[in-house]
Image (spheres, rainbow, N blue to C red):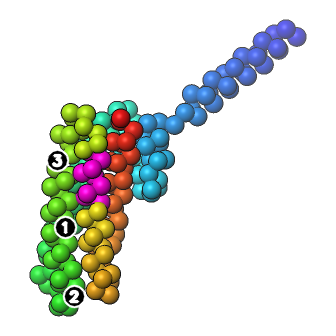
Amino acid sequence: MALNYKIIFLLAINGYLFLTTHARPTLLEEVCNKTVNIGFCLNVFGSDPATRTASLPDLGQLAIAKATDRAVTTMKKSKTRSFFASDPKIRDALNECVHEYEAALAALRAAPDHLRKGRYADVYRHASQAAGEAIACQQGFLDRSVRSPLTRENLQLRDYCNIIEVIADASH
């Protein structure tokens, strides 16, 4: 009978330890839970095995790199589409987007150095500026009452920048 109690006790302790070790959110989950688009954050970063053990600055550098890649791709897409656009309203909006994405890229390219130096307020400011440029690009289409061919890209850059903002804020 005493053996049964010991087994039950060991099973209970083992179950408790299992629950407590697996119930803690990872750093990535903590960051993503503070973002505007949790699903986007987990989808983009959760598939990368390096993020499971990454530090906050490492996650920040990864987010900046992904945001920069998105901005470069979107700027190229804006240039190409503006060249072939037959509607002058769309062409003008796309040309504005090129300039806005140039500004977004300048902001994003300054962020890694600030992150390395621990200047988190500057990282936050640059991420916010880049997000603002993506929103301004989107607004240019709305102001002209035309459908944006860049909505998905603009929202993705905004979401990447929000992740950077959360990381910068958590790093203080």
The reply to whether discs 2 and 1 touch (Cβ–Cβ < 8 Å) is no
Q: Closer to the N terminus: mark 3 or mark 2?
A: 2
**In the rendered structure, which amino acid carries the disc numbered 2?**
Lys
Is any part of residue 79 visible from this angle? yes
Estimate the spatial distance between the alpha carbons at disc 3 and disc 2, rounded to whole Å.
32 Å
As drawn, which residue projects farthest toward the right? 1
Q: Is any atom of residue 72 visible in this view?
A: no
Q: Residues within 10 Å of mark 3 (few under 14, many from 20)?
A: some
Dot 2, how many residues are within 10 Å of its Cα: few (below 14), some (14-19), or many (20+)?
some
Judge from the rendering whether residue 147 lies leftward or rightward of residue 97; answer left or right: right
**Which residue in the structure is indicated by mark 1?**
100
Circle 3 residue:
110
Q: Name the residue under label 2.
A: 89
Q: Does 7 sit above or below residue 61? A: above
Q: Is residue 171 left or right of residue 13?
A: left
Instruction: Tell me the quadrant of the picture where the N terminus can be found.
Output: top right
- Please report the residue visible at 27 percent of the width from the left and 66 percent of the height from the top: 134
Dot 2 or dot 1, earlier in sequence: 2
The residue sitting at 51% across, 37% down in the picture is: 25
| Magenta region | 123-131
Which SS class for mark 2? helix
Q: Which residue, as the protein is rendered here, is positioned at the far left?
A: 83
Up/down of 60 relative to 158, above or below: above
Q: As drawn, which residue projects farthest toward the top? A: 2
* Label located before the other in sequence (3 or 1): 1
